Amino acid sequence: MALSGHPDHPEQVADWLLAGLELKSTLFHVGEYCGVYQASTAGYQRASFHVVLDGGCYLHLDAGAGRSPRTLTLNAGDAVFLLSDVAHALTPDATPPADLTARAGKMTPLPSTPRTAPGTGTTVALACGFFEFRTELDTLVLGMLPNPIVARRDSGRLAGMTQIFALIQAEARRPGDTPSPLLARLTDLLFYYALREAVHAQDVAPGMWRLMRRDAFGRLAAAIIESPGERWTTDSMAEFVHMSRARFCKQFAEIGGQPPAQFVTLVRMKTAAALLRAGVPLPEAAEQVGYQSESAFAQAFKRVTGIQPGAWRRQTAGAAPQTTSPSPLPSPRTATASTAYPLH
């Protein structure tokens, strides 16, 4: 992928992150809240999402590692993806509740037609669920992303995202007792668009996205992604961005949240994983990402992904099994628009 000539490094890196990412969403609940409510998908040790189908609400997020408490306004067509089990609550009130772990109200079936009242208020229609990434490498990539990722329907930058919102709304209101199985697949697509949209956000949390906004570091990351087999030492990277070694290491770690060598290794292993999945022989894959020794490559690959390269190839040849066991949940197959699981 030729990246170095592009001025918009964040978006190019976003495309690289998306390549090969294996997301699987499960629909947990579709329905409507009216009046006083406090809903959440927290407490299940899983990443989750909320898509606002109609109406509006407020999302209250608890403080976390390096993050202050936040309240976000969500309107019809907006979606939020929580990449970890973050304490949060959806309410009709802009004032955060005293206890984010409390739940109140009852979700009821969606009406056959959307309500006309726009914006936040006492009525909101939601599609909620959980998502997971199929491999440990995908999970590591998550550490480079802002959390949460918020997709705004009115951003106007991505026409495809608006079309997906419309499809989700249409599928959610299909008649029948069981929600459409297409809702989860459409949510997968929505996440990919939301990730691409996130690079344009003005309030991106510190991390790799913030690093990409700095021209020198953005060009460096693009060059590493373009040529992972090059000899990317600390000295050569510092020279690339015209900094002293000490200043380069300090700024990269402070802004990006990880040392530069760790980023290089992650890029190489993600590239190698894609090569192995495509059937490239192990020695060739190792050489393409800068390893002359197969054993050294295998050790690095296992250290990052948790499995040997050969096992990775076999695992990804078919349907990749989960690498972690999710917390027990009611079966998504039993979720209906009229069945209330403990979101409230």
Image (cartoon, helix red, strand yellow):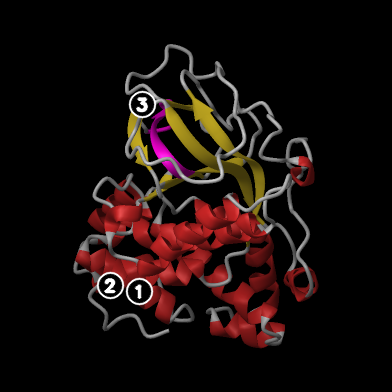
Say which of 236 and 124 sits in front: 124
Q: Main secondary structure of the magenta part?
A: strand
Image location of residue 9, percent across then percent down: 29, 70
The answer to whether 332 appears left or right of 165 in the picture is right
- Location of residue 87 in the rendering, given as x and y in whole percent from the top left corner: 51, 27
Residues tagged 1 and 2 counted as in contact (Cβ below 8 A):
yes
Which is closer to the viewer, label 2 or label 3?
3
Residue found 48% across the figure and 62% down from its top: 164
Which residue is drawn at the image coordinates 30% and 61% (left, top)? 212
Amino acid carrying label 2: it is: Arg
Furthest residue in direction top, as rendered: 98
Percent x, y of residue 29: 64, 39
Helix, strand or loop for disc 3 = loop
Q: Secondary structure at mark 2?
A: helix
Q: Residue under circle 2?
A: 219
Disc 1 residue type (three-letter): Ala
CA gap, disc 1 to disc 2?
A: 5 Å
Q: CA distance from mark 2 to mark 3?
A: 33 Å
Residue 82, label in figure: none
Q: Which residues are magenta?
A: 52-66
Depth order, front residue of 7/42:
42
Residue for badge 3? 69
Identify which residue, 65 or 250, lies in the foreground. Answer: 65
Q: Which residue is mark 1?
A: 222
| Residue lying at 43% horizontally and 32% vertically, measured from the top left | 65
Given the image, on which type of amino acid does mark 3 rest? Pro
Q: At 58% from the left edge and 30% from the top edge, which residue is drawn?
A: 42
